[in-house]
Image: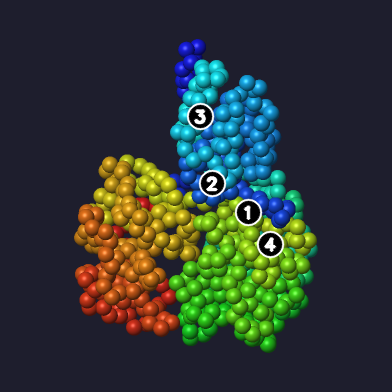
Amino acid sequence: MKVTPQGTVKVLDFGLAKAIWWPEGSRELSRLAAVRDVDSVAGQIVGTPGYMSPEQARGRDVDKRTDIWAFGCLLYELLTGKRAFPGETLQDTIASVLEGEPNWQGLPAKTPALVRELLRQCLQKDPARRLHNVADARRTIEKAQRGWNRWRVTAIAAAALAMLAIGGAALWLRNATHLPGRSQWDLLTKLPDSVVEPALSPDGRTLAFIRGDSTFLGIGQVYVKRLPDGQPVQLTHDSMHKMSPVFSPDGSRVAYTAEDLQFSWDTWVVPTQGGEPRQWLRNASGLVWSGPHQVLFSEMEIGKGPHMGIVAAEESRLGERKVYFPVDAPGMAHRSYPSPDGKWVLLVEMNRDHVWVPCRLFPMDGSSNGRPVGPPKASCTSGAWSPDGRWMYFSSEAGGLYHIWRQRFPDGQPQQVTSGPTEEEGLAMAPDGRSFVTAVALENVSVWISDARGQRQISLEGNAADPKFTPDGKKLCYRIVTKTPNEFQFSREAGEVWVADLESGRSAPLAPGFQAAAYDISGDGGQVVMEAEDREGKPRLWLTSFERQEPPHPIPNVEGRQPSFGPGEIFFRGTDGIDGFVYRVRPDGTGMRRALEQPILTLYTVPDRPTDAKA
C-alpha cells in the first residue's frame, strides 16, 4: 500500500490467505489440549486476529458489521502507526480484541472529534451498538475534511477501505495449516495425525487417548502418555473400531469399547504398562467405573433391535440392573458419567434416527428418566463432572460447532467455556478440577474429482457430503452442511443440494434455500428426490427436477427418510411402531408397500457405477 505525492492510494501487492485442505477433503489434524483455567473463556482463533471482531473471534455469526470493525482497526492503525489491539503473542492479541480497548490517547492531537467518535462507533464490541453502514463512515469523514487536513483524511480513509477489501478475503479464506493456541491452553500431543477421546488416570499424571480421527466409534489404536513430557506408548495393535478409553480406579488398566466382526460392541482391557489386550465384557460399551468394583455400561436389549440403555453392575457383571433406557425405542444410550457422590449420572444418547441429542441428567437409582441438560436442542457427545460435583460439563454442538459448555448442578444456566472456529470434543477433568483435557480440531470436508484432467476441488465453502454423479457423468451433486461427516456417522444434518457442471466448473444450488438431509438422482437423470421435514416436523420425501422450473413438492401421504431411486419407484426407510422398514412407492405417491419384511436399522444404497469423486 502506498500513497503517492498526488494523494492517490495504490495497492502494490495482494497477500491473500488461502485455505489449504488435503485433496481428499480431510479434516485438519486433531490435537489433545489441556485448558488450564476452566473459569476463563478460551477459544481457538485462526486468521488475522488483530482485525477480527469479537463475534468473529468467538465463532459466532458475522455480517457487514464485522467489516466495519476491521475498517475501524485499519483506520486507527493508519492514524497512529500502531495496532488498535496489539499483543506480543496471538493469545494476547485475541484477549485484547475480546476485553481491551484501543489506546485512545495515542491518536494524533489534531484528530477531529468527528473522527474520534467514528472510531469509537466502529470499534464497539457489541455489534448492535456498532456503526451499521460504512457509508455513514464516509459521510463523517467528509464532514471532518472541513476542519482538518483534507489530503490526510482522504488518503487515510481510502487506504483503510482498500485494505478492508483485501482483509475480507483473508478473514474468510483462512490458513488452517496449524492450530493456534491461547495462554490458557497447553498442547499435550504432537503426533503427525489425529488423536481423540482423552482420558486421565485417577492421579491425573497419565493420559490415554485413541490415535484416530473419529470422535465416536472408529478405526484407531489406544495410546497412553505420561504427563507432561512422556512419549506416547501404543497399547493396541489391531484393526477393530474403538472408542471411550477409561482408566480403572487403581490406574493399572485401560478399558475401551471395541467392535468385533459380529458387530458386537464389547469392553476390552489392556494393562497400562503394556501387555496383551483381552475381551472382558460382551455387549458392554462406553464402560466407566462408578466405584472401586462397580461399573456402568451401555447394553443392547436382546431381541429389541438397536435399543441400548445404561446398566449398573459389579465388575464381574453380578447384580446387573437397569438404570436408564430411552423411552423412544430404538433410541441408544452410549456414554454415561456418574457424579462424584454416585447419586446422579450424565448421559450421552442418540434418538431413533441415530442423531445425537442433548445430554441427560438422571438419578443413579433409576427412579426416573431425568431431564435434558446443557444447551437445549443441541447435540451432545461427551460429558464430565467437576470433582466437587458442583458443575456439569458437556461437548455440545450449540451454535453449529462443538464447544465445551458447563452448567451449575442441578439446574443452572448453560455457560460456554470454549469458542472460536475450532471444535472441541471429548472431556477428561483433572483431579483438582482446575483444568480439563479435550481434543481440538479444525475440520473441513470438501468434494474433489479425479479424471483425465487431474484432481481438482469442486466444493469451495462449508462441508460437503454425499457426492453423486448424474447418470451421464456430466454433473456432480453434493450437499453443503455445517457439521463435518465422519466415517461412522454419515451427516444427517440438513443442507442445500448443489450441482456442479464438470465441463464449465460452475456450481449452483439445485433448490436455493431448501434444506435436505438426504437425496438421490433418478436413473434417467431427470429428477432428484430429497428428504426434508415439513412445517410440522414430519420427515417427507420431496421431488424436483434438474431444470429447476418449479420448487420441490412432497410425495403425497408419505413419511420417510433416506430415499433412493429404483426402477420406476423410490425406496426409503419408514417406521412402523418402534421398528424401521424398507418401503417402496411410486413418485406420484401410489403403490406404497414394504420392500422387505425384516426390520432395519438404517438404509444405504450401493452405486451401480464406479465413481472417482471423493468427499
Task: Quote the CA–CA distance across marks 2 and 3.
Answer: 19 Å
The residue at the point 33 percent across, 70 percent down is 540
Q: Earlier in the sequence, mark 2 or mark 4?
A: 2
Say which element carries label 3: helix
Q: Earlier in the sequence, mark 2 or mark 3?
A: 2
Please tell me how crowded label 3 is: few (under 14), some (14-19), or many (20+) other residues with Cα within 10 Å. Answer: some
Residue that mark 4 sits on? 428
What amino acid does circle 2 point to?
Answer: Ala
Return the residue found at the far top. 5
Residue 405 placement (x, y as % from top left): 63, 60
Residue that mark 2 sits on? 128
Judged by depth in the image, the label closer to the viewer, 1 or 3, is 3
Q: Earlier in the sequence, mark 1 or mark 4?
A: 1
Seen in the image, is 100 located left or right of residue 348? right
Please tell me how crowded label 2 is: few (under 14), some (14-19), or many (20+) other residues with Cα within 10 Å. Answer: few
Task: Quote the CA–CA distance across marks 1 and 3.
Answer: 38 Å
Residue 598 seen by the camera: yes
Task: Quote the CA–CA distance across marks 1 and 4.
Answer: 15 Å
Q: Earlier in the sequence, mark 3 or mark 4?
A: 3
Residue that mark 3 sits on? 140
Q: Quadrant of residue 522?
A: bottom left
Judged by depth in the image, the label closer to the viewer, 1 or 4, is 1
Judged by depth in the image, the label closer to the viewer, 2 or 1, is 2
The residue at the point 43 percent across, 56 percent down is 481
Q: Quadrant of residue 469?
A: bottom left
Structure colour scheme: rainbow
The mark tally for this picture is 4
In the foreground, 450 or 467: 467
The residue at the point 51 percent across, 56 percent down is 400
